[in-house]
Image: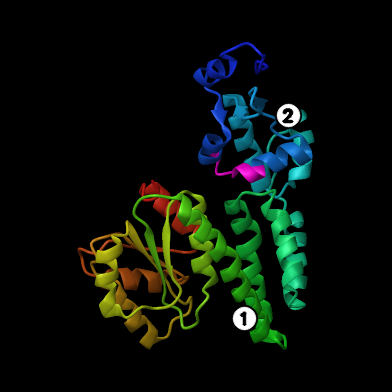
Amino acid sequence: MSRPISNQPGTAQDLVAAGYLPIRDVAGITGVNPVTLRAWERRYGLIVPHRTAKGHRLYSPEQVQTIQTVLGWLNRGVSVGQVKSLLRADQPLPAEQASQWQEKRDRLCDAIHALDERQLDERFNAELALYPVQILCQHLLLPLLVTLEARWPQLPGAATERLFLHSWLRSKLGARVYHDNRQHQGQPLMLINLCQSPMSPQLWLCAWLIGTAGCPVDAFDGPMPLDELPLAISRRRPRALLLFCEADSNTDAQSTLQQWLGDHGIPCLLIGIENQQEAEQLVARAPDSADVTVVADPLAALQNLADRHLLE
């Protein structure tokens, strides 16, 4: 049982000494940002923390564990509005339910098809207030991009829809990356778009995820001259290099890409090659001293960086 905070002097200090954590620390541990934690509390009465005399939130170790349980529910497709009753009933985690995410993706698709930026922004903001960014990326945005890329070749206006969405993503996520960079210290991760087109959704999703994880990013949304890459690395001293490329590369594009996979003296992640055999060939042709890893998407990149302690 959590002890209530009283008006006695030193109560808040006692709770901190007993392992209670402020909201910023809880956000760092769970990956759920403070805005979302406050929204869960305010709108659903979910994870109600203790309050100090000054109104600061303190979360017990049990509440931190409950947040992890909530994330398990959300990752299986349960809506945040359903979680409280399930927690009270002490239900086990269910099999994944995709319906609520499909409905959310359909609503975003409608806004994109209408080229309605305000509607798209409002619908996305509503989800952003309730769900951690990794869950939104995994269940909403990445599947949405796959759905649209499959749909666009068969529909008129596809190029306009694609440009509309990519412009919105770059603007929306770029602003958040800019804000996050102002809060973070230390060496950045360097992201470079090697795709034929600018405004790579994969790059901006990855930059958003990394920034949310507490690491600064340098996002170059377009291929810098290859011979200037060593200069950029020497000036910025990035902790790793992330290269974003087309999923289906032709021979000339692969030859150009191979030139980027040299020994840069830092880890290099190649993102966007879906063909496993093609990925293995690219890595095999890299210099023996080069630290090159191929990952499938921004979520896999984030996990790889975390496993290698490159976000710390």
Circle 1/circle 2 CB separation < 8 Å: no
Q: Is residue 282 left or right of residue 122?
A: left
Camera-side mark, 1 or 2: 1
**Residue found 51% across the figure and 40% down from its top:** 28
**Residue found 77% across the figure and 65% down from its top:** 107
Q: Is residue 285 left or right of residue 184?
A: left
Front residue of 282/50: it is 50
Depicted 137 relative to depicted 169: above or below: above
Q: Position of residue 196 (x, y in %)?
A: 46, 83
Figure quadrant of residue 160? bottom right
Quickly name the residue at label 2. 90
For mark 2, give the secondary structure.
loop
User: Would residue 126 be visible to someone looking at this image?
Assistant: yes
Counting every numbered tag in the picture gives: 2
Q: Identify which amino acid the numbered label 2 is placed on.
A: Asp
Front residue of 3/73: it is 3
Q: Which residues are magenta?
A: 30-36
Query: Real-space Cα distance between discs 1 and 2?
Result: 46 Å
Mark 1 is surrounded, within 10 Å at the Cα level, by few (under 14), some (14 to 19) or many (20 or more) other residues, namely some
User: Would residue 208 be visible to someone looking at this image?
Assistant: no
Depicted 95 relative to depicted 262: above or below: above
Q: Position of residue 71 (x, y in %)?
A: 63, 42
Figure quadrant of residue 227? bottom left
Front residue of 188/253: it is 188
Mark drawn on residue 163: 1
Q: Position of residue 299 (x, y in %)?
A: 51, 57
Q: Identify which amino acid the numbered label 1 is placed on.
A: Leu
Q: Give the position of the N terminus as an image quadrant.
A: top right
